[in-house]
Amino acid sequence: MDTDEECSIVLELSENDPFFDKKKKLLQSKGFSSKERIYLRCSSGPAWMNDTVRILLQIARIMQLNELELYFAEDDTKVEFYSPRNELEALNSIVLLTDKSLSSCTDFHTNILQGLRETILDLISDFGDQNNVKGVIEKYHSCDQEECLVEWGKSHGVKTQLKIAYVEGAGRGMIAGKDLKVGDIALEIPASIIISEELVLETDMYRLLKEIDGISSETILLLWSMKEKYNCDSKFKTYFHTLPEKFNTGLSFGIEAITILDGTLLFEEIMQARQHLHAQYDELIPPLCNGYPDIFPPELYTWEKFLWACELWYSNSMKIMYSDGKLRTCLIPLAGFLNHSLHPHIMHYGKVDPSTNSLKFCLSRPCRAGEECCLSYGNLSSSHLITFYGFVPQGDNPYDVIPLDIDGSDVDSIENKPVVNWATHMVRGTWLSTNHDIFYYGLPSPLLDHLRRSRSPLLQTKTFLQGNLENELEVLGDLTYIFDDMMDNMGDIDLDNRESFNWDEKMAVDYKNLQRRIAHSVSTSCHNGFSMLKNELLKCMAEDILG
Ligand SMILES: C[S@@+](CC[C@H](N)C(=O)[O-])C[C@H]1O[C@@H](n2cnc3c(N)ncnc32)[C@H](O)[C@@H]1O
């Protein structure tokens, strides 16, 4: 921010950004550099604010891309939107920049900056309104246990603007008690009531477990929580009383649901996770119960109770950065009622504030009174959410990708242009793409470029020359083969008796339909591509004949 006559904001891509080169290239493709000074000139016409905001957002979006979004980001000026997460991060990053500038600018510039801030806040609000997935509140349930926990929390210093209620399809959730705006603290939890490894350090259990080679603090905490749940004198007994008796995650899927999943990515994910947990249980628990039954009473350390604790930690824990700079996996009473959304209100919550020694859940977008206030659990695919949390989020999940088992290593340069390497390749629903033109087809450019180069390393790509068009047809042919085969392997689902399905079978069917829809969209986009390419090839041949 300049303090002289010209008011400006500088957006700079950090050199420490792990994707600096890729983002710089994308910025350049849209006519920007990695450091852009944007002048805020109200004299430059009535549309200056909209024009300025559009440019600021274009740059901020690219700077805020994560790796997966970057893979699917099309180097095409038509693309204005990458993902809900990215949009909110980009808008919030501009608010942060204006706040910083406002704290150091002259009176002359205050109005301009405040005007810009208001405009961005309106955009954040509009973005939320357009994308709100309404949590339907089931008012008739009572939340006695939960109310006790709120009271217990308040007596330990919790500050909350949220109430607990039942939300259709998601169990309990947290609802705004009044209108909350960007930056407001919806919930504040003192570090003293967070369940972390610190609690266990002084116990006999810890002294024994720490001797086991390679045991993680997460595993120690998990074993501690299995016993603490039944400790009548536990400081956390009010918290443990509010936990469900059953979690219903993918880890507890029955054989029928698993059978439905045959041929899907989720099948592999659940099988691997279960094998891992069984191996861990067999290695750890019987020797502990046999050797130290006083500390590990066998009746508290059954396989079922172990699975319950695993599901608790997978679905309810958060990774928190403490003031000492250490990242700890924690259970956080009350915050554990916050549900996940693809359009979350709260995106940043993982750091203990050293000045208050508390964890603050601040809003990145407004939440109206009576609206469910949601978190982002992270950039997670539906298969991960089913396996470890037991639900499929509503709406289009940009992290639902199908990885492709092809060698990702690329040559270093082609046509004298440096090639940006990607170690792995993937696809997602092509309905998420805005560019279905020839040479794009709604598919990710890194994948297409890789397939083009591996078929024909020296061709000039994206040209209407016959050789290149034929190469494109072969690339799309390879992809169609992969995805038609995937759909065949998944088989059909008999949906006639869906209503009689159990919770796990329903989830399995929903997931299979999702993977099928993605594979089908890729196959359809390839077929549309074939038509475009064949038309161009015909034109090419006609021109050749006509000379
Ligand atoms: C941290 S807890 C949130 C509180 C939880 N609803 C409860 O009643 O205890 C995480 C669990 O909430 C549920 N959940 C969270 N977000 C959800 C969503 N968007 N849709 C459906 N269920 C959700 C899942 O069962 C998940 O394992």
Image: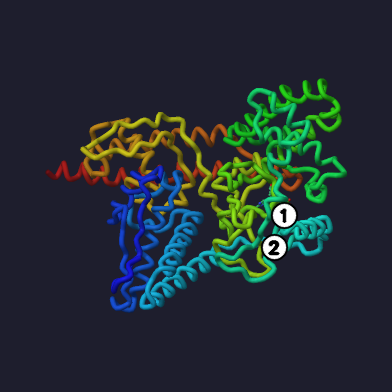
How far is disc 2 from disc 1 in space, using C-alphas?
Answer: 9 Å
**Residue 412 or residue 484, whichever sits in front:** 412
Q: Quadrant of the N terminus?
A: bottom left
Element under label 1?
Answer: loop
Q: Is residue 268 left or right of residue 36?
A: right
Q: Is residue 198 left or right of residue 362?
A: right
Q: Is mark 2 within 8 Å of ligand 1?
A: no
Q: Position of residue 412 (x, y in %)?
A: 28, 33
Query: Which residue bears the numbered disc 1?
Result: 334
The answer to whether residue 423 is seen in the rendering is: yes
Residue named by callout 2: 160
Q: Is residue 160 left or right of residue 547?
A: right
Mark 2 vs 1: CB contact within 8 A: yes
The local crowd at label 1, few if under 14, some if 14 to 19, many if 20 or more residues have their Cα within 10 Å, is: many
Residue 526, x across and y down, in percent:
40, 42
User: Which dot marks residue 44?
Assistant: none
Looking at the picture, tell me which residue is in the foreground, 1 or 369: 1
Residue 452 in the image: x percent, y percent?
Answer: 32, 35
Kind of residue indicated by mark 1 = Leu
- Which x, y percent locates residue 515? 56, 41
Q: Quadrant of the C terminus?
A: top left
Helix, strand or loop at disc 2? Answer: strand
Residue 527 seen by the camera:
no
**Residue at the image position 70 percent from the left and 62 percent from the top:** 159
Q: Residue at x 65, y 23 (%)?
A: 213
In the image, residue 353 above or below residue 492: below
